[in-house]
Amino acid sequence: MTAALSPSLDTRSGSADPQRILQEVFGYDRFRGPQQAIVEHVVAGGDALVLMPTGGGKSLCYQIPAIARQRAGLGVTIVVSPLIALMHDQVGALHEAGVSAAFLNSTLDWTETQDVERRLARGEITLLYAAPERVTTPRFLALLDGLRERGRLALFAIDEAHCVSQWGHDFRPEYRGLTVLHERYPGVPRIALTATADDLTRADIVERLQLQDAGRFVSSFDRPNIRYAIVEKKDVTTQLLRFIEAEHPGDAGVVYCQSRKRVEELAQTLADAGIHALPYHAGLDAALRQRHQDRFLREEGVVMVATIAFGMGIDKPDVRFVAHVDMPKNIEGYYQETGRAGRDGAAADAWMAYGLQDVVNQARMIDESPAEGDFKQVMRGKLDALLALAEATDCRRVRLLDYFGEASTPCGNCDNCLNPPEVWDGTDAARKLLSTIYWIKKQSGIGFGAGHIMDILRGKATDKTAQYGHDKLSTFGLGAEFSEAQLRGVLRQLIATGALHVNAEAYNTLQLTDGSRAVLKGEVPVRLRASISAPAARKPRRERGGSGGKAASPAAASLDAAAQARFAALKSWRAEVAREHNLPAYVIFHDATLAAIAERDPRTIGDLQGVSGIGAKKLEAYGDEVLRVCNG
Ligand code: ADP
Ligand code: ZN
């Protein structure tokens, strides 16, 4: 807990000009996208709702106003965040930049808590991180009252604001209690930030947090360095292994699974294959979970195999891939999870395998949930949008951005753009499948599952076809020319588009819907990816730099041999410092910053000035050592 309690190294005095703070404290030249407008708005005391994709740079949007308002004598900024397990590192990162910060949460003992409270009351803290359940306690509110009376409550930053909405994918009921902030402290500005931005969630945030009059800042949600690919699921474990071995040997990544059991199995399989993989899910002991998270953040090349319990707030910049071996619930979740790749702006992959079973499972989970009808309908609509994305034969990114209300043109960096899939006309197969379902229902009075229906159409005699006399049906063997994979693809798309319903209450039997008729009549064509059963064409590999073997850091790809050596020396020095400070290495310096230093071949402190990512405090703390490492 030293980071939380170490005496402030402080930048509480100095210029309150945002541009100066950006350069001095964070070592960056210029604001990105709408950052400047947001910062100016909040520094001036306005409320703001910030919608920016993961990796877009949300933290500076409240950290710079916090520093500016502190320097203007307005006091502390309270950062509300659900991420207790990350607060230590977040505060540590601010300390590294010379900003006085602290956190209050359940990991602190009584004395530590009192110490933070005392420093808070004395006005020594610029940013205080706390979880929502803490912020709304009478004890904490009494502290805030005291600060408010003395005009020392500068700003509320509500991070991960989508947690307030049940439509978001991380609903936290405690967030609802945050209404107390604007009711009790009406004059204190608030900035709410999220990377989730479908209309429903957005509207909910505005309403729940009463941000109707807040300035709205919506960034582009595009993450151009992430390459999206969605593949047909066959033997997903093998597919995943091949993907990692071919594209990301030695890289850090996240693999998302639906169930805890699957997480454990897959982590073991990857580990057996020599991949540095660790499991993470809510069923693991909290201490073990924290240890795995720390290793993912602190060590290089760890692959975290996880449920969605993992990842919110993870700001590791060099995650090179995010893989989904099971389909998520909706596009918001998918986009948020894949967005954890490539925050450093270097090339990264979002890879998902998806199959008929995913569609069936997700549809069933919605059907079986105890939620109200309207809620189910919304969930179903969201699932449909994701299914349409998975089935798409055109640009994935265009569809993703369209979902977030952004128009764009084909990206050239997704599977469909890079290898346009051949399309085959599945209309005939679809009509035959639907009429088989119709006829067996008529004949036997009950529905059947996908496997049996495909058997009938392909003319495969089984005990079941004999038992029900389905080998006498007129459609028996009528689709012998189709492979099972093809029919599976057709069924998946029929379910995805609502032309078929999977009845979870009756053994996952397939039922016709109102939407079936148009397909049966041939009014709605069914177009499918032809590559479904063909082996996937190899996609062109990106330049990774380095000299083969283990992948080199993309940040250092363009360095010459001497600079590569400096880069390597700087990295091992950084690892040392990070260990001493108990922080992830990237909190000390990003790879890109080390690469820039290595390239400059610095001889004097002056040579280090202006390198992106070196602020005044880091220059003072590390400048001499960096020079020694480079010239050693
Ligand atoms: P978010 O919270 O939106 O996911 P972060 O605030 O973690 O994103 O920022 C993502 C990365 O971009 C961080 O490594 C951060 O240091 C960097 N970054 C943010 N703003 C700038 C900027 N103006 N110039 C350079 N780097 C920036
Ligand atoms: Zn594309």
Image (spheres, rainbow, N blue to C red):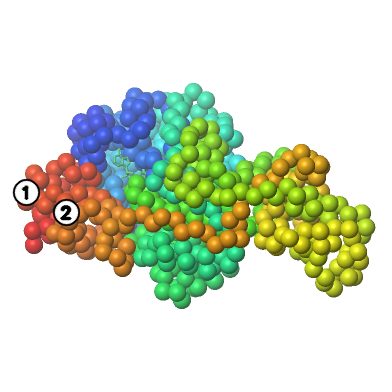
For residue 548, the mark is: none
Seen at 61% across and 51% down, the residue is 529
For marks 1 and 2 on the same chain, the one whose residue lies earlier in the sequence:
2
For residue 598, the mark is: 2
Q: Which residue appears farthest toward the front when viewing the image?
A: 481
Tell which quarter ligand 1 is in.
top left
At label 2, which amino acid type do we have?
Ala
Q: Nearer the viewer, residue 73 or 246?
A: 246
Q: Quadrant of the N terminus?
A: bottom left
Q: Quadrant of the C terminus?
A: bottom left
Q: In this rendering, which labeled residue sits more in front, label 1 or label 2?
A: 2
Seen at 8% across and 58% down, the residue is 631
Q: Is residue 482 left or right of residue 401?
A: right
Q: Is mark 1 within 8 Å of ligand 1?
A: no
At label 1, which amino acid type do we have?
Thr
Seen at 16% across and 60% down, the residue is 561
* Residue 64 in sight here: yes
Gap in Å between the C-alphas at discs 1 and 2?
Answer: 13 Å
Picture layout, residue 138 above or below residue 289: above
Q: Nearer the viewer, residue 182 or 475?
A: 475
Residue 140, quarter of picture: top left
Which secondary structure lies at badge 1? Answer: loop
Q: Nearer the viewer, residue 140 or 300?
A: 300
The image position of residue 478, as x and y in percent, is 81, 59
Circle 1 is placed at which residue position? Answer: 604
Picture layout, residue 583 above or below residue 170: below
